[in-house]
Image (cartoon, rainbow, N blue to C red):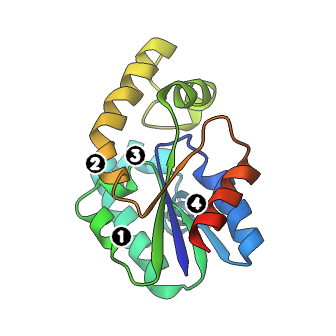
């Protein structure tokens, strides 16, 4: 079984993915880290030097590589991964894989991302919490079509990572 975590940046995909993989004895992949290793550049550098379109193309290439070359893993995708081209259709129909949408509220995302915006190339230019909130609201509206196609939806607000992991395990097994 492969578990693919999707959701907006800041929803906890990496933290939850690592713990989930550890408990299940599965391999763990963070798609952004995998891309950085393969491209020998950070995601921020790729966005800056090659642009978002280039990034989305290599993101899909490496997503396919992870899916085709591995079994029994947990994969944390980037927030925009399922929203490019037919990627969501690809991952939802990939044999042996289950997609899990980590649903996190606008308020929680804004709070988390304001603290770490300098590490996120797509929001690093945003100055105020109000502007960030509007930015996330617009993105969530645009991306909800893709996110809501996930096989499983888990609400994350007010829950510890361990509780979310337990919810995923209870739902899937």
Callout 3: few (<14), some (14-19), or many (20+) C-alpha neighbours within 10 Å?
some
Whole-angstrom CA distance, mark 1 to mark 4, is 22 Å
Disc 4 on helix, strand or loop?
helix
Check contact, mark 2 vs mark 3: CB within 8 A. no
Which residue does the numbered mark 4 point to in the structure image?
Answer: 33
Residue that appears at 47% across and 71% down? 98
- The quadrant holding residue 139 is top left
- The answer to whether residue 118 is above or below residue 86 is above
Mark 1 vs mark 4: give the one in front: 1
Residue that appears at 28% across and 48% down? 145
Disc 3 on helix, strand or loop?
helix
Q: Earlier in the sequence, mark 3 or mark 4?
A: 4
Mark 2 vs mark 3: give the one in front: 2
Residue that appears at 37% across and 70% down? 91
Q: Earlier in the sequence, mark 2 or mark 3?
A: 3
Q: Earlier in the sequence, mark 1 or mark 3?
A: 3
- The quadrant holding residue 10 is top right
Q: Earlier in the sequence, mark 4 or mark 2?
A: 4
Which residue does the numbered mark 3 point to in the structure image?
Answer: 47
Which residue does the numbered mark 1 point to in the structure image?
Answer: 92
Of residues 59 and 70, the one drawn nearer to the viewer in this rendering: 70
Check contact, mark 2 vs mark 1: CB within 8 A. no
Whole-angstrom CA distance, mark 3 to mark 4, is 14 Å
Disc 1 on helix, strand or loop?
helix
Whole-angstrom CA distance, mark 1 to mark 3, is 26 Å
Q: What is the x, y in percent for residue 45?
A: 47, 47
């Amino acid at each position: 079984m492969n578990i693919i975590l999707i959701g907006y940046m800041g929803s906890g995909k990496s933290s939850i993915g690592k713990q989930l993989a550890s408990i299940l004895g599965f391999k763990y992949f963070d798609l952004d880290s995998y891309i950085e290793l393969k491209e020998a550049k950070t995601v921020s550098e790729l966005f800056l030097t090659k642009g978002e379109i280039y990034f989305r193309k290599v993101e899909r290439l490496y997503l396919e590589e992870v899916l085709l070359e591995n079994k029994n893993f947990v994969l944390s995708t980037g927030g925009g991964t399922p929203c490019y081209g037919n990627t969501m259709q690809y991952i939802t129909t990939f044999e042996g894989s289950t997609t899990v949408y980590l649903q996190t509220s606008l308020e929680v995302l804004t709070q988390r991302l304001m603290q770490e915006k300098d590490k996120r190339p797509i929001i690093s230019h945003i100055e105020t919490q109000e502007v960030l909130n509007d930015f996330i609201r617009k993105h969530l509206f645009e991306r909800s079509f893709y996110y809501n196609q996930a096989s499983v939806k888990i609400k994350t607000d007010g829950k510890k990572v361990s509780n979310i992991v337990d919810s995923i395990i209870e739902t899937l097994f």
